[in-house]
Image (cartoon, helix red, strand yellow):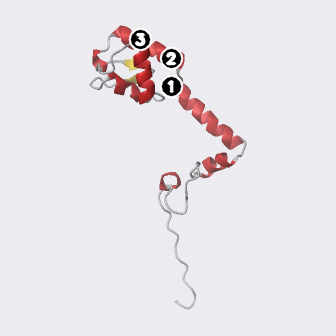
Amino acid sequence: MARIAGVDLPPNKRAFIALTYIFGVGKSRSHDILSALSIDENKHAKDLTDDEVSRIAAYIDKNFPVEGILRRETAQNIQRLKDIRCYRGMRHIRGLPVRGQRTRTNARTRKGPRKTVAVKRSVKEM
């Protein structure tokens, strides 16, 4: 089983798709990596030789931030926005959408499940 950047690649998928299991490597970057190393995209991950796997791992380590390094970098960027208290940072702090989406409806992914507010009864109804 091929292991690159701390991630086990799924053996029954094509190398092109298997590389996308690495955080920071999408389809276009996967295509670029395989074409730069002249490795067939349609070859399955289990059919990659040890030499090819080591070449891919070395190429990725040399040219791209992936996995832990990329996650840390992203977290530091968000923390910087929070520290300088800019608009985007405040949206991160409050758990609201950051990129201008509406919040009157939708935005449930960022806001979480609905919190129902009880209706106050007036004195007349009692």
- Considering only vertical position in the picture, is 21 above or below 52? below
- Which is more N-terminal, label 2 or label 1? 2
- Residue pictured at 48% horizontal, 62% vertical: 114
SS for callout 1: loop
Q: CA distance from mark 1 to mark 2?
A: 8 Å
The residue lying furthest to the top in this view is 51
How packed mark 1 is, by other alpha carbons closer than 10 Å (few <14, some 14-19, many 20 or more), is: some
- Count every numbered label the image shows and give the total: 3
Q: Which residue is mark 1?
A: 66
- Residue pictured at 52% horizontal, 27% vertical: 68
Along the line of sight, which residue is nearer the eye, 49 or 69? 49
How packed mark 2 is, by other alpha carbons closer than 10 Å (few <14, some 14-19, many 20 or more), is: few
Rendered location of residue 1, percent (x, y): 32, 18
Q: Name which residue type carries label 1.
A: Val
Q: Which residue is mark 2?
A: 61
SS for callout 2: helix
Q: Which residue is mark 3?
A: 54
* Residues at marks 2 and 3 touching, judged by CB atoms closer than 8 Å: no
- Which is more N-terminal, label 3 or label 2? 3
Rendered location of residue 33, percent (x, y): 44, 19
